[in-house]
Amino acid sequence: MTDSATGVASGVPGDGVEGRFLSSAHRLAGPVRGITVAVISVFGLLAVPDEALPLGFALFGLVLAGTAVDCWSGLTGRGTTTALACAVLRVVAICATQQWTGETPNLWALNVMTTTAITLQWERPPRVAVPVTAGLLAAHLAVVGLDAAGTVAPRLVFECLLARLGFVLLRRSARSVDQLRERRSALARAEAMSLARHRQEREYLALLHDTAASTFLLVAVQGKDNDPERVAEYARRDLSVLTGAAGGATAQDSPVDLTTSLRAVVGRGQLAVDVRSDTDSPVPASVALAFVRAVGEALVNVERHAATDTATLDVHDEDGRVVVVVTDSGVGFDPEAVPRSRRGIRGSVVERMAAVGGDATVTSRPGAGTVVRLVWPGESGGLGGSGGSGE
C-alpha cells in the first residue's frame, strides 16, 4: 500500500528516522507553500496598478483561501487533493491575469509558480509532481509567450531538480540511520543472547557438578559396595533436578550446605567479608546455586561501586525461612535510578531468587551503604512459589 500524497510504502516504520522525516515533509510542505505564496502575494499586490486593484485583491483573497486549505491539510493530514487543486488554481489565476496586474511576465506570477513547483517535489511523488509542474509551466507560457521559455523553463527545471535531489538525499540519510540503528540493535540482541546462553551453561555445569557428578564419584569410589537401588534413586533424583523447569528446586533436589557454598564465593574476591552464620540447615542444590550466584553478584557490585573493601555476609533462619544478607557501608546508590538495561541487580539477584521461589530486596541510598536481603521460604513454601519463570 502506498500513501497517495508521498508515494511512500506503508512498510516504512513510523517511529524510525526515515518515517518521521517523510511524515514531517508531507505535513509541512503544504503550510510552507501556502505561507510563502501569501507573503509573495503581499509584495505582488503592492505592484498592481491602481486601476487593477480590485482584481489584485480578488487574487489575494484566493491566495489566502488556498493558504488556509494548505495549513488545514498539513495539520490534519486530510484534504491533500483539495490542497493540490487550490495550489494549481491560484497559480493559473495569477498567471492568467498578469497582463492586468503588472508587466508581462511579472515576478508575482513567476515566484508563485516556482514556489508551488518546488514544494510539490517534497510533498508528492514524481508521477504526480512532474506532470503538475509541466502544466503550471504551460499555463504560464500560454500567457507570456513561448519567447520566455528560454529563461523560465531552465530556471524552473533547475530549482525543481535541486528540491527533489535534496529530498532524496535526506531520505537516504534517514534510511541509513535507521539501518545503522537496526544493525546495532541486532548486535546487542545477539550479544545478550550469547551472554544468556553462556550464563545458563555455567549454571547448568555447576548444577551438574552438584548432582550427576557427585553420583558418578560415589559409584567410582565405592564400586561394588554400592546398593543398586540406592544408586538408581540418586540417578532419578539427579535427572529430576537437571530437567526441572528453569533449573528450579524440586522435592528431590540434592541437599547442599549453604554456608559452606557461600564461604567458597567469599574467598574468590578481593573484599574482606565477615561471614556470620547461625544455621547449618542444608538447602536444595539449585537453591544453593541461586544464593551463590546472587551473593556473588552482590559482592562484585560492592567491589566495583561501593568504594569500600569490607562487607558482611549473614546467614540465618527466620521462622523456617533461609535468609542471607549482604551488607556494606559504602557510598550507596538510588535503586530507582538504575537503568533497566543494567541487569546486575534485576537479572543476577532478583530474578535468580524468584526462579527458585525465593525473594530478593535491595535497600540503599546515597551515603548510607547497601543491604541485599535474599530469602528462600523453605521446602514447604519455596518449591512452587513465586519463582518458576526463570531467566
Image (cartoon, helix red, strand yellow):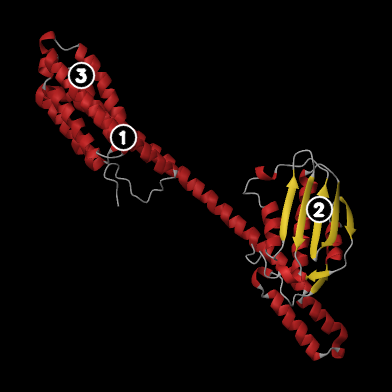
Q: CA distance from mark 1 to mark 2?
A: 60 Å
Give the CA distance from mark 2 to mark 3: 80 Å
Please, is residue 329 above or below residue 288 in the view? above
Q: Nearer the viewer, mark 2 or mark 3?
A: 2
Q: Residue 303 at what x, y percent from top left? A: 80, 47
Q: Which mark is residue 108?
A: 3
As drawn, the residue found furthest toward the top would be: 50
Is residue 351 in view?
Answer: yes
Check whether the beta carbons of the residues at disc 1 and disc 2 lie within 8 A of each other: no
Measured along the vertical axis of the image, is residue 227 above or below residue 295? below
Quadrant location of residue 101? top left
Residue marked by disc 1: 74
User: Does residue 156 show up?
Assistant: no
Identified by mark 3, the residue type is Trp
Position of 347 relative to 69 (above/below) = below
Front in this rendered view, residue 356 or 347 = 356
Circle 3 Cα neighbour tier, 10 Å, few/some/many (<14 / 14–19 / ≥20): many
